[in-house]
Amino acid sequence: MAKPPSIPTRNTIHWRQILPTFLVLFLPLITCLAVLLFLHTEEVVRLNTLLIAPEQIQGNAFSSSDQRARQGQPADKKVQIRRSHLVLFLGLLTVALPLFWWLALLLTATREHRKHLLTEKQQVAHLSVLLQTIIDLHRLIGQEKEKDKLIQACCELLVASRGYASAWIILLAQDEKIEFSAESGLYHSMDALQKQISLGGLPPCVVECRRKQPEIVAIEASTSFCQHCPMANNYPSSGLMCVALEHNSRVFGFLNVSLAPELIGDQEEQRRFSEIAGDIGYALFNLDEQQKKIEMETALRQSEACLRSITDFAKDAILMMDSQGAISFWNPAAETILGYRAEEVLGKNLHALLVPTRYHQAHHDAFPEFIRTGCGNAMGKTLELAALRKDGREIPVALSLSAVFQDGSWQAVGILRDITDRKRMEEQMLQSEKMTTIAGLAAGVAHEINTPLSAILQSIQVVRQDLSPELPRNQEIAGLCGLDLARVTEYFEKREINYFLDGIRDSAIKSGKIIANLLQFSRPRQLVFGMADLAQLLDKSVELSHTDYDLRKLYASLHVEFIREYAPNLPPVSCVTTEIEQVFINLLKNAVQAMAELPEPRPAPRITLRIRRQDSMLRAEIEDNGIGMDENTRRHIFDPFFTTRDVGAGPGLGLSVSYIIIVTKHGGQLTVQSTPGQGTTVAVDLPLTSTPPDETT
């Protein structure tokens, strides 16, 4: 702020102030000296005149002396008095004039000092208002979180504090268009300015401010400078200042204020104005950063919510393993597939919990390389492996692995899919292909064997007929040959030839039954479908199985207990009843034989019969607590002629024929679950439809 002039004192009076004083002081003295010189000259002239005319003086001696006696003394006295008055006047004049001049100077200096003091007080008051404005501005910046409201409140604050007559702010986007604008204290609106900027024309103050950035543009004569600006009418007799609102090398917009012209050039005023602009620029920068942070947080929350939705509703298990081999993520599908809740597995070693023992060595060898580089033979691939459920069962899974570098270490993300149904379907498809191939072979074999087998049976029948003594023709031929048929028959009995002939016949008949099964296996007959109660069919099959000689003996020796678990109100199914009964009898026979194979001491034999609705199927289960079977055996049980029984116990076609009946003819499913030493459960699924599946003869 400019300093006012000091009061003139002996130490502060300038030579330009002293010079008039000396002139006034010496002018009376010079005048006085001039008058005295004049008087002295007059007296000298008078005395010289007296000396030049002595005779005149002598002739008139008495008269002159008399005259001096009469008039000389009073005349000299008057002259002396006149001279004294003149000297006194000159002395008083000499003293009074400088005094009056000094007093005039002192009054002038005092008046100017008071004027400067008033101006200084006004500036101090203005700056005090600005300081309060800055304080209020800081408080406002901390409260407002939106740009448009912030700049509008800033403009109103700058004007309401009486720091500035008017204020306006424009924030420009990257395309030089107005993003936000605010004003306060203007006589006219900013519509014209906004229109000009939208057409690509910036006001002169902004153009100059960009050129001089980051300096302040201070304009005292705003009328001439802003004559082509649409805002010129808002400050006709004011100066203005304009500055860029920037922070961290980013220009957000421009601040323009109008104020008294005498304050425009004040350095303190400009510094405070620059401070206000810097605070607003910093606030805008913070709002941008906060907005970016909010957007990033919102995007992160949306991404997390999306990821959470994906992982929560995914049908595949999604697991994550950290660098220590511990489980760090476990989605709901993993709970369903593997049986563990998330709190049961998080933080525990993944391979010790879920991986069968046979895979542990491979993991132990590959894990250090994965931790070091994030690479491995299994990374980026989909492998078909086995996984351990909570109940100890192994299930086939498809595992896709990928590496993620997180928190300074490599971690593994695995997507695990239960492929039990797919494997079962593949097995069924493979089994169907096998059945189709073997059916063709069986048909050919049956036809090839059936012809000589028929000849054997017919030959045995002819031999028995030709040896019968009851036929007259036989007696006639024997007489011609000199034979006694009774003695020949006796010979056959004693040599047990009849026994061997009966054996040939029985074997041929048994082979004929096998051929009949093969023919049925290769070309099932077209039978009539009807609606039937599956529970009744299963109970009837149990009764029929007791009529089988071999089964009746096993039932009697084992004391098999039947447990029925039938769901109420079951709908009927469309099926060929005789074929479904045949399937149930085959399954019951296998169950009884499996229980009989358990070594002593064995648990009490028990067969559990269940019928319940399974989606669009009606499921019948036959569960035994017999010897069970391993996985390799289970894979081949539907193969024709495959059997685990002793030779002669059966041809191994029971389950193959059952598979054809259920899957091919009835469009259902036949599945087996078994655990060695614990038993086997066979499930028969028949579709709940009134329309029978298409048949192929």
Image (cartoon, rainbow, N blue to C red):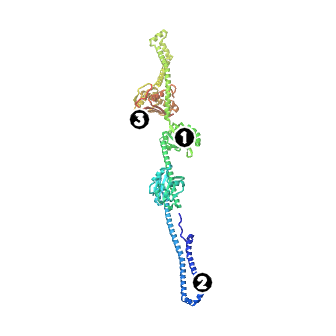
CA–CA distance in space, label 3 to label 1: 46 Å
Q: Nearer the viewer, residue 99 or 112?
A: 99
Q: Nearer the viewer, residue 120 or 536?
A: 120
- Percent x, y for residue 514? 48, 23
Q: What amino acid is labelled 1 in the image? A: Ser
Q: What amino acid is labelled 2 in the image? A: Asn
Q: Where the C terminus falls, by quadrant? A: top left
Which of the marked residues, 2 or 1, is nearer the chain's N terminus? Answer: 2
Q: Is residue 685 visible?
A: yes
Tell me which residue sits at (51%, 41%) in the image. Answer: 318
The numbered mark at residue 567 is 3
Q: Which residue is mark 1?
A: 402
- Percent x, y for residue 169? 48, 54
Q: What amino acid is labelled 3 in the image? A: Ala
Q: Nearer the viewer, residue 418 or 143?
A: 143
Q: Which residue is mark 2?
A: 48
Q: Local crowd at mark 3 within 10 Å, few (<14), some, or many (≥20)?
A: few
Nearer to us: label 3 or label 2: 2
Q: Is residue 155 above or below residue 535?
A: below
